[in-house]
Amino acid sequence: MAVVDLTTFGANLYLLTGILVVLFFVVIPLALAMIVTLKWLRWRAVKKQADLEHDRKRFQPDGRHYPPLGRGLCDACHVADDEVFFLPSGQRLCHRCYPEPIDSPLPGQDTSVWKDPLESPSQGT
C-alpha cells in the first residue's frame, strides 16, 4: 500500500489551483486582447487602403470631383460602357476619352497632350 503525504498533496493541489486561476484570469484574457488588437490594426490598414482607392475614383489628382458617372454611350468613341462621365456641358465621355484619366498611363503611352475627341480633324489641302 502506497503512503501518501497529505501535506505535499495539499501543496501540489493548491499550486495547481493557483496555476489554473492565473491561466484563466491573466493569460487567456491577454491572449484574446492581443488577437483583437492585431485584428483591429489589420482592419484599420485595410480600411485606409479602401478609402484611398475610393477617393482615387472620386477625386481628380488636383482635388476636384470627377463628373457624375453612369451607364451610357460615349459621345467620342461611340462605345457603350458601364461608367461614362456625364459632363455639365451635356457630353458623355468614357474613361478612355475623358481628358484626365483615372488610371495611371500605361508604359509608353503619351498623355502629355490631350486632343478633344469631338473636334473635327482639320481639312488639309
Image: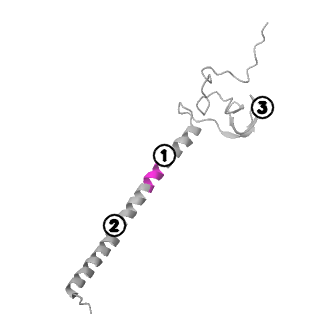
The amino acid type found where label 1 is placed reads Lys
Identify the image's colour scheme: rainbow, by chain, secondary structure or one colour: one colour
* Position above or below: 101 against 14: above
Please tell me the numbered disc located at residue 4. Answer: none
**Is 40 covered by the magenta stretch?**
yes
Badge 1: few (under 14), some or many (20 or more) residues near its Cα, within 10 Å?
A: few
Please tell me the numbered disc located at residue 78. Answer: 3
Give the CA separation, mark 2 to mark 3.
65 Å
Q: First in sequence, mark 3 or 1: give its number.
A: 1
Q: In the picture, residue 114 is in which quadrant?
A: top right
Please tell me the numbered disc located at residue 48. Answer: 1
Name the residue rendered at 32%, 68% in the picture: 26
For numbered disc 3, what is the local secondary structure? Answer: loop
Give the total of numbered labels. 3
The amino acid type found where label 2 is placed reads Val
- Per the image, the residue denoted by label 2 is 27
Q: First in sequence, mark 2 or 1: give its number.
A: 2
Q: Main secondary structure of the magenta part?
A: helix
* Position above or below: 2 against 64: below
Span colored in magenta? 39-45
For numbered disc 1, what is the local secondary structure? Answer: helix
The amino acid type found where label 3 is placed reads His
For numbered disc 2, what is the local secondary structure? Answer: helix
Give the CA separation, mark 3 to mark 1.
37 Å
Task: Give the quadrant of the C terminus.
Answer: top right
- For the residue pair 7 and 1, the one nearer the viewer reads as 1
Seen from this angle, which residue lies furthest bottom? 1
Q: Say whether residue 125 is left or right of residue 33.
A: right
Name the residue rendered at 42%, 59% in the picture: 36
Name the residue rendered at 75%, 30% in the picture: 75
Q: Are marks 3 and 1 in contact (CB under 8 Å)?
A: no
Q: Say whether residue 12 is left or right of residue 92.
A: left
